[in-house]
Image (spheres, grey):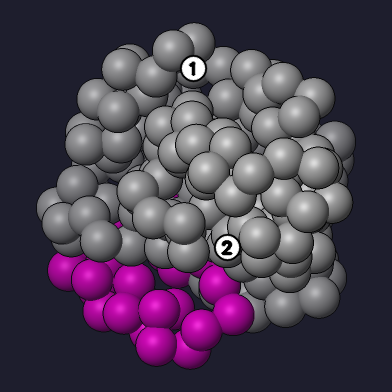
Amino acid sequence: MKLLIVDDHVIVREGVHRLLAPYPDIVVRDAAAATQALTIFRTQRPDVVLLDLNLPNASGLELLRRLLKDDRNAQILVFSMHSEPLYASRALNAGARGYISKGAAAEELVTAIRRVAEGGRYVEREIAAQIVLMPSAGADPLQSLSTREADILRMLAEGKTLAAIASARGVTYKTIANSCAVLKEKLGVARTGDLIRLAIEMREGR
């Protein structure tokens, strides 16, 4: 099996190399950026691409789409620092065959790689359980946002405070705070800081 790791962090790439060293049937190559990943993918046709969503000067989701455009049968397993179900839903809806966080156990990562290589699908167990509990299981939660909620998310991405958003919309701070609580529930995040981070990453197309 040929595996291509796409991640801009050397420590992550080296860690996966060491993790898979005991498995002689898995030949590992790696890339730190989207352009390098595309070149290796096109010349070596790996069986599985282990793809990080956060790449320098590129969107992991956009690279995922480019890989699938190049080969609609590409087996892509997203390997992300994000364990929120929204990220998994977006990746799967974009065409990924699986999703696993960097906090997963090593054994589960190996299982996910092999499952995807065999043509199956794999979502980290804890994340899969959260997706099932989402209002529209498997769907992109962004599609469930109202126009007002999407606008609040946009303003958060622009760096506006809750007070500034309330002022801009002509409502009370409490109204915006309540809307943010609903947003966090819909998008599967626990803290306002996570919501802001998510809003920024969505704006950047990650």
Q: Which residues are magenta?
A: 1-28
What secondary structure is found at the residue carrying circle 1?
loop
Residue plotted at (48% across, 31% down): 182
Q: Amino acid at mark 1?
A: Gly
Q: Quadrant of the C terminus?
A: bottom right
- Neighbourhood count class around disc 1 (C-alpha, 10 Å): few under 14, some 14–19, many 20 upward: some
In this rendering, position of residue 161 left or right of residue 184: right
In this rendering, position of residue 16 left or right of residue 148: left
Image disc number at residue 197: 2
Residue plotted at (72% across, 78% down): 56
Percent of width and height locating residue 160: 74, 65
Residue plotted at (72% across, 21% down): 146
Residue plotted at (72% across, 40% down): 171
Percent of width and height locating residue 47: 53, 45
Judge whether residue 19 is colored magenta: yes
Up the image or down, 193 lies above or below 13; here it is above
CA separation in Å, label 1 and label 2 = 22 Å
Any part of residue 161 in sight: yes
- Mark 1, residue position: 138
**Residue 185 placement: quadrant:** top left
Q: Amino acid at mark 2?
A: Arg
In this rendering, position of residue 170 left or right of residue 17: right
Front residue of 198 and 154: 154
What secondary structure is found at the residue carrying circle 2?
helix
Up the image or down, 108 lies above or below 38; here it is above
Front residue of 149 and 188: 149
Front residue of 133 and 152: 152
